[in-house]
Amino acid sequence: MTADNYRCDVLIATWNVNSLKARLQRVQAWLEDVRPDVVLMQETKMTDKAFPALTFTEMGYESAHFGQGQWNGVAVLSKVGLANPRANFAVGEPDSEARIITADCGGITVVSVYVPNGRALDHEHYQYKLRWLDQLAEHVAAIATPSGNMVVGGDYNIAPADIDVWDAKALEGSTHVSAPERQRLEALARWGLRDIVREQHPEAGIYSWWDYRNGSFHRGWGMRIDLMLVTEGVAKRTTWSVIDRNARKGEQPSDHAPVLIEVSQ
């Protein structure tokens, strides 16, 4: 029996890996080091057939993947059981892109999301992003209640507030910080999803994404766009949370860092 069998808490992570094929060894090393119980993954950038499920099985994880090739792709890994995996939205028209997957893991419903980038405020992809977020709100309401046990984690491509970016004025007029995007997050909050990492870390300067260009990581030019939004049943049992900046260091990292919460059982 391993030490993991004695753990009474569930460690849940979300991580946009920015190509699982390119970074599988880094992901494996991180899993071995941190030993999360549940991982919500985004931008796997591979088909379901290419997804390395056997590799994760050998590491003790069940897995479910929703992919489409060289773009997008979301997954759930779990050491605490993985039941009822379902790709795409629970309500409305299915999305043509692989951006959302839901599963039940250790008594918690988890949703891995990769929200569209938006590209520019006058681009059709921005309107797609807003529609996508509206449909996410419908999905959440269809599968859970505000008092229940659910985690909706992933790359939201939205900084919830100006404190979540290194320079609000530099980003004015661009995606990720626009009022309509933030209003969609506020709608999720009104329904009952809580930004548990921000609640536990009210300070400025905590980011989860840094551009590869201009030495942004070392200069601290980041944004907090990878979020763990949780219902009340999870929020009241979340003992701690962290953004693992160390995973952004080294050779050929993802431009995102993992975000983790620990939930007591």
Image (tube, rainbow, N blue to C red):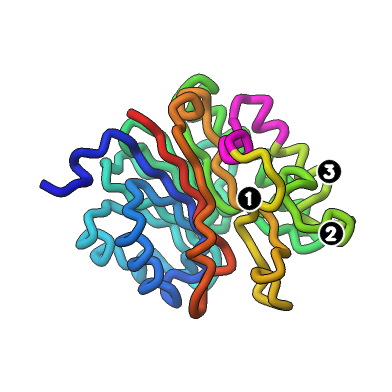
- Image quarter for residue 66? bottom left
In the displayed structure, does residue 154 sit left or right of residue 46? right
What amino acid type is highlighted by mark number 2?
A: Leu
Looking at this view, is 72 or 242 the one in front? 242
The amino acid type, in three-letter code, at marker 3 is: Ala
Left or right of 143: which side holds 134?
A: right
The picture quadrant where one finds residue 220 is bottom right
Q: Dot 3 corresponds to which residue?
A: 179
Relative depth, front residue between 77 and 30: 30
Task: Tell me the element at label 2.
Answer: helix
Name of the residue lying farthest toward the left: 1
Identify residue for label 2: 171
Task: Name the amino acid type tagged 1.
Answer: Tyr
Question: Residue 223 in magenta?
Answer: no
Task: State the SS at label 3.
Answer: helix
Q: Is residue 92 visible?
A: no
Q: Which residue is mark 1?
A: 156
19 over 103 or under it: above or below: below
Residue for point 73% across, 78% down: 214
Does 74 appear above or below 261? Answer: below
Q: Main secondary structure of the magenta part?
A: helix
Question: Can you tell which of label 1 and label 2 is closer to the viewer?
Answer: 2
Q: Quick one: label 1, few (<14), some, or many (20+) residues within 10 Å?
A: many
Instruction: Decide which of tag 3 and tag 2 comes sooner along the chain.
Output: 2
Q: Which region shows up in magenta?
A: 186-200
Can you give x and y, in whole percent of width and height, for residue 243 in the image?
A: 53, 52
Q: Which residue lies at the image location 52% right of the left edge and 71% below the top edge? A: 249
